[in-house]
Image: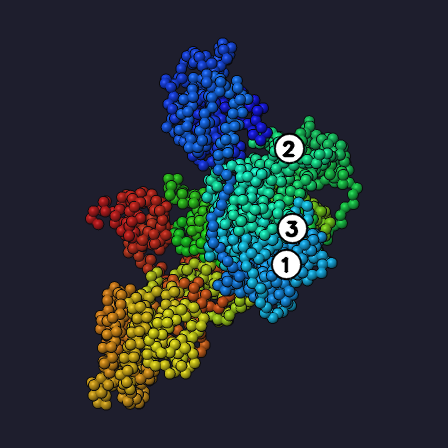
Amino acid sequence: MRSFRTWSDYLPDDVELICLDLPGRGKRSAEAAIRSMDVLVPMVIEALQAYSDRPFVFFGHSAGALVAYEIARSLEQAGRPSPFHVVVSAHPSADLPPEEPPMYTYADDKLADVVRTLGMVPTKALANEKLLLEFILPPMRADFELVETYDRNLPTPLKAAITAMGGVKDDINANDLDEWHRLTTSRFARIMFDGDHFFTHSMTEEVVSSLLREVGEVKGQLPASIQHGEVLPYNNLTLHEQFRKQAALTPDSPAIVSEAATITYRELDELSDILSRHLLGHGQSRGSRVGLLMDTSPEYAVALFGILKTGAAYVLLDKAVPVAAIKRILQKACVEIVVTNNRFAAKLPPDWSGIAVSLDKEWEAQLGKASPANPPTVDLDAPAEISFSSGTTGEPKGIVCPHRSVVSSYQWRYYALPYASDEREAVNLFGAMMRPILAGIPAYLIPDDVIYDPHRLVDYLERNRISRILLTPSLLDVLLSSGFLDVRSRLSDLRFIYLSGEVLTAALLARVRDALPHVRIINYYGAAEACDIAHIDLSEIDPATIQKVAPVGPPQYNVSVYILEEQRDPVPLGFSGEVFVGGDVLAHGYLDSPEMTRERFLPDPFRAEGTMFRTGDLGRMLPGGQLEILGRCAFMVKIRGYSVVPASVEAALLQYAGVRSAAVLPELNPTTGQPDRLIAYVVLSNPCKGWQASLRAYLKSEVPHYAIPSEFVALTELPIAANGKLDRSRLRALVQEACAPVTGTDEVEPALLAAWRDLLQAEGADPGDNFFDCGGTSLLAAGLCTHLRKSLKVELRVVEIFLNPTFNELAALLRKRVVEQGRPQNAKLPKTPPVLPGGAHVKALDRRRSPGIDIAVIGMAARFPGAETVDALWENLCQGVCSITSLSTQELKARGIPEAVLKRPDYVRVGAHLNDVDLFDPDFWNLSRREATLMDPQHRLFLECCWKALESAGYAPTQHEGRTGVFAGASSSLYLRYHLKGGPSDPNNAPLAFLTELGNEKDYLASRVSYMLNLNGPSIAVQTSCSTGLVAIAVAAQSLAAGYCEIALAGGSSITFPQAGYQFVKGYINSSDGVCRAFDADASGTVFGDGVGVVVLKRLEDALEANDPIHAVVKGCAINNDGRAKSSFSAPSARGQAEVVRQALASAALGPEDVEYIETHGTGTKVGDPIEIRALAEVFAEQEKTGHACALGSIKPNIGHADVASGVASFIKTVLTLQHGVIPPTIKINRLNEDLGLEDTPFFINEQLRPWRRPPGRSRTAGVTGLGVGGTNCHVVLQEWDSDNARAWPGSVERGSHALCLSAKTPSALSRACRNLAAFLRRNRDIHLGDVAHTLRVARCQFEHRTVIVARNLDTAIARLEEEVDRAADRTLSSPSIGFMLPGCGVQHPRMFKELFDHVPDFRNAFLTCADASRRVLDRDLETVMFGEEDENRTASFEEINVMIFSVQYAMARLLELFGVLPDYLVGHSMSEYIVATLAGILKVEDAVGLSVIRSRSMANLSIDGAMLSAECCPSEAERILTEDAWRDRAEAGEIGVGVVNSNTSVVFTGKWEFLERLQESLKQREIPNKLLNTAGVPSHSPLMKQATDMIDVQARVLEKALPNVAIALNSGSLHRVKVPLPESHWSGQATETIRFDRAIQAVVATGATALIDLGPSRNLARFAHGAINPEDCKTRIPSIVPAARDENDEESTDRHVLLECLGALWAAGVAVDWKRASDQLEPFGTRRRIPLPTYSFDGHRCWPDDQPAGPTVWRHPGGQERQRGEVFTTADEQPQEDKKSFPKEEVEIGKVNMFSNDDPRRIFLDEIKTIIGSNEIGLEDNFFDVGGDSLIAAELQANLDKGDRWRPPQLDEIIEAATFGDLYDRICRRNHPSQ
């Protein structure tokens, strides 16, 4: 290609020549030549990518012609930018086959002859054999192979024009070249030159000239860059008219949502009306211009619509411009009134004579309600908005936009990008506030101080679940460059990002797609003078087709776009020019500036009578019709005669991997005033040495040489202007400041080197030598201090040598100390200030570059020495309790400590141990006692703590949604070493070994919790020695912040064995006297102890959304390692510790001045504590000068060093400290250690219980440090959570009842749960019962033993809970069956169910369904009859009573079903069988209501003066009475009889009134209680009703009836099954036949029903059901009989209270009640917060190896004197279930065993089973899995049973499949004992 490089001499300046050097020739000779088109084409396409952002032409000569064609074809096929013209030279058409045989296969000599014959290489070159064979033939052979192996089936015609060129003396003649015409659908031409094959070299000038002519011809035939958008009709209403219409449609929907308030459409309409009337009253109307000066706020929207409603236009006043500029705008626009607020009113010119209307607090009241005025009507062409820009002269120009331009632009968005109903659009930029509001979508207002702060902006978008937002590319670039790792998960609700205002580069688009793949990026183009011009959804575009800048799409509807050159002729498609716009989106022009308007708003030559606007933007129209904006024409500059667009250089810079953001500006020559060079301003990803050279080298391959910037300036960020765009005017003022090097004092290094040599006997020292690695010790360190004190006269402490152990570090420290010598020292801070400072906040260090991670601490659970709960721990800390206790000789001997050890003087008899570590509840976890015993108590207690922690957080441990992670660590298993003797004694017992490993290895701690609790988030074992617990919390917080889980459990577990004292070793970390004295002068070490702690973490926003209890907030955290810069592997490093604190503060976006308490690692060692203080002092340097004080503390003197769990202990203590606002004392301090050096720091050791006042305007902030042996440091920054900031539930809290649901796996655990909750409520009298009820429902798993307490207040709840303590709860049924009982007439009473109708929507809706159906058949409205005046109810007709009963029973049944109570059986009483038919799906509601009325009306129309009389007597007695002489004849005549048999003690007589009246008197004489029923004179279920049956039958026959889907207990007493049709006689027969309700109930009971529910308002069916069931009948289960409604005489309860009790009873029976729906409607409206309540009370069973001592034993559950029964620990007043049986279980088990003799094989077999399972309570009838077996135990059992000769070895499947152990025994004995 070298020969073509001279072509540039003949090309004009605006044409660039690009020549490609291919491998294998020229300067790339060392590379392998390319032999395949498949390899070459992609390589060339990639190389050309940097140039494809402009129109281009391909020229290919010889083999290059084929390459040029194939590349063009490939580009067109891929839809990527392709050449508009292809010139092929000296090569046959691509579709012609090559000559045979292929020349690339020729031998070298033959190929050389061909080359010689063709004259392709000078003869002189061919004579040089080395040159020929090594440099000429190889590339030529490759070219031949490239051409001859090309697939000739590929060629297809190009869209591009083709020009073929050739030489007349070449073998390839004109006819050969003409064949190319087949391969273009466009223009074809052939040109011949008077030359040979190499005419391009010999005739360069003529060839280039001809080529340029051809290009000009082709260019002239390209389509013009003119695009007209589709015509789309749009709304003809003005903006304010559209708003009024939307406000009428959705008056109560939110229109504006701001941080301060939410305003509905009705409120916005009313408020804007108030403002509008006020403005009209001040003469503002059509033609007026009202100023608007305000920040983004709800009042801004009020002002917009208020001004528009007057007919005036609003004038936008930029709050960022100076007063002088505002004055010019006000004058130019003739503004008489400005709507503003007090904050911005000061920006109005003092000499302006207009009126300022301030919309501040209560403004509407101040404006008053002016008399209504009729504003003049305006049309779409009236001005709506006037916005001002500075203009090029500095004189403000006002752009007048009519309603039409905005309405038209909004219309395309609504059409092309419609809103979903649940969307939320966030607005701030470009006045986009009205767009969502007019579409019925709330506009979320981004505060002005948030929109330009990326961290706060992301937080805002995440918190408000925003779905759409408009940003500038610069603003989006800053957001993505702000270091968010979790932006995708945090902005998961975001669906659209509109980008406008600037060019969107391909590089930025790629970053957006990578960071937010789920978001649709809408790139749109507009201007102040043309609202919206074009848009494109970039998610629909292939990224490969986007070059340096993203297109903005085709013109939108009703818009035209033209790309014109300077003479305003259209440029060809693909060529750049200035963008002009026409259509309905245009502004009218510039306010009172006709000349300026004429310059920019021109007649549109392409649309009749149209106007076009000259945008000043540089762009081009792509072949697909999409517009691409390249930048501003004003930014095209001439540099040394070359035209350069700086935006294209910016785009090239952004393609470089190390550049995050870039801006390129021309630099003006001071003499000429013209640009003469470019300056590039870049934000680098990772600045490094030599970056400028690397960047310059990269640009050489991307842009022309003249476009490479002369200078590169690195910035930390690009400046953003107030409009969200790049502020180019500020770039030149930004420079980086270099730090001046610090020089030391000359005498330091020689003095240090001399001391180093003397003490270490070393020849010299390298700068990196470590004092301790070279042989230094603590004694030698003291000598070094003495030596240097003498030689340099400086003070140096031993601890400082530990902190700075290398030669370089010590030298730097000494230089600093020498410089400081002679300076006055800071005054010492008081040892214990009276209170923490609460004065003014002094900002000393600004590290707020990133927001805190904001992780809420929502739950905690722990067991530490002396404290079984977190509350107990806090109480101990506040009281200064030390839980490190002395151990007696007796205790130590009982724990296995030898006598010889106890006699040693260095044995320290203290311990910080947990109680009852041998107790566990294996049944709760479905573990066998055997497996539990093999599990380290560290794992067991951690598992229990995780359960309790989740419950304390308000989550049911195994049932909450989302991913929950577990991050935890444990200490080494000393239980395995000391109590399991290191593992199984049988090395061949692999299953037992594996089971032991699973129970003891630290690897399985976290994953076991995930498995047991079914948690699906990350499950990570963390092991960093003593910092493990805190590191686990930090990793969990980071995991939450990154979106890897929604909830995280984090903590640690450490239990030492044996639980005894320790041997003191001098120089080791243990304390010499068993006291941990952190910070004390007499500190001699720490005391290791036990501890288990777990915290539950959640993203703060998620916690707020869920109303979780928030104890504190993790603002930031950091983890690092010391590396090697310290005295030894196990030694601490101040540098590492200081750095981790700095990183944590930076992570939290806080400074040292914000922190007022630090919970230190504070182990009580001589060296460790001072090093930790010095590290903190380094971070907090200079703070003491500001008066800032910070308290320090340590929990270890209280509970000992809990090793792996120590960080969790510190964390929990700090959370409690923040929560309570009190700092507990650090105990065991007599005299502070002077080496702490507190006098130069802001720190003091807190030695007393101290109130912590909240700093003014800030939150309490604390730090927690955890340090691990090996150097892994962790620091967490915590902040209090001010509950005042929590989102309050709107509305007041009503009074009412709440249902408290409790459950447990055992009766004893349930009893303790009731006792614990009662005690908790007594202690917390301010708690809200609704929160208790809510937490118990959502935060507790549901177990088989249950109880429910329904209470209105705390006292009732406590009393009921205490009653439940002694009540044994039945086990719930897994599949309970439910029957609904529905009463008939006679049970009604005035205003029954009125409360449910008023307050329970589900009841009301179902009732109204019946009421609607009744309107067709009743004269009066049912709702009025039932719930109106009592007179209405009392005068109800028989048919109205029937419909009333029908409606309320139907509503009650449907309500229960919606609450999750689905009936298995339906029992109707009398006319309620019609309701039953409806509930069973047989009849439709309207048909059933109609039939009920027909029935009632038919019976009432008989006009029989009848009645019904209930009597409390048995059926036989009733029949006997009717056989008496006084009644026999009447009874036989059907005039009196037994109509209903309710139960064994209740019947209803029916008949004529006169006889029933006499019968009533007779019953009174017999002292039989009785009562007349209100049936409106109708004697139902009597032969007297016979005449009504015909009418009922006629109506029933015509109704559509389905098969029943629920079993029905008919009034006849039979049970009617599902899917069986009812007989046609059923509907009328039940009107005359006797109701046998007693038999119906008995039929349901016989099925084993769990519960029967009385849905009626008098509870009579409940009484009847009790009377119908024989309690002596033991064949069937007696169901619970539960009333669902309040009795008329019950004055104490409410309908909702009784219904809650009903649901509670059903839930206790096992029904899956939908408590969420039920509580929302039945309980008082309230906050529904999750709150910490007492957690599950596990049963305690001793799970410990036989004959092994455990630790201290104290009953772990509160509540009275405890005693022990066997291995189950119970309370003194609690009798185990087995004691309540006829025979004690122990006797039963002994009986089982004694059935066999000692040598009976079955006894031996069972003994083996018991040994493996770990339980003595196993018999042959038990099932393997029921007693805790699993696959691992099955394998172990198989191995053990294989050892005897009494039976054959079992197979694993036999063990698993055997029904019982007896079955298994029979199987394995069958072969050896055929007789059995």
Earlier in the chain: of badge 3 and badge 2, it is 3
What is the secondary structure assignment of the residue under circle 3?
A: loop
Which amino acid is tagged 2?
Answer: Ile
Query: Is 145 placed above or below 915 here?
Result: above
Earlier in the chain: of badge 3 and badge 1, it is 1
Q: Which numbered disc covers residue 489?
A: none
Query: Is 168 placed above or below 697 here?
Result: above
Question: Is label 3 or label 2 in front?
Answer: 3
1042 and 825: which is toward the camera:
1042
Marks 2,1: beta carbons within 8 A: no
The residue at 50%/28% (across/down) is 214
Residue 1342, x across and y down, in percent: 41, 60
Which amino acid is tagged 1?
Answer: Arg
290 and 487: which is toward the camera:
290
**Residue furthest to the top:** 127
Determine crowd level at label 3: few under 14, some 14-19, many 20+ residues with C-alpha closer than 10 A. few
Residue 1235, x across and y down, in percent: 69, 45
Distance, label 2 to label 1, CA atoms, is: 45 Å
Which amino acid is tagged 3?
Answer: Ser
Residue denoted by label 3: 593
Q: Which numbered disc covers residue 289?
A: 1
What is the secondary structure assignment of the residue under circle 1?
A: strand
Residue 1418 in view here: yes
Query: Is 65 placed above or below 1318 here?
Result: above
Residue denoted by label 2: 639
Distance, label 3 to label 1, CA atoms, is: 16 Å
The residue at 43%/78% (across/down) is 1428
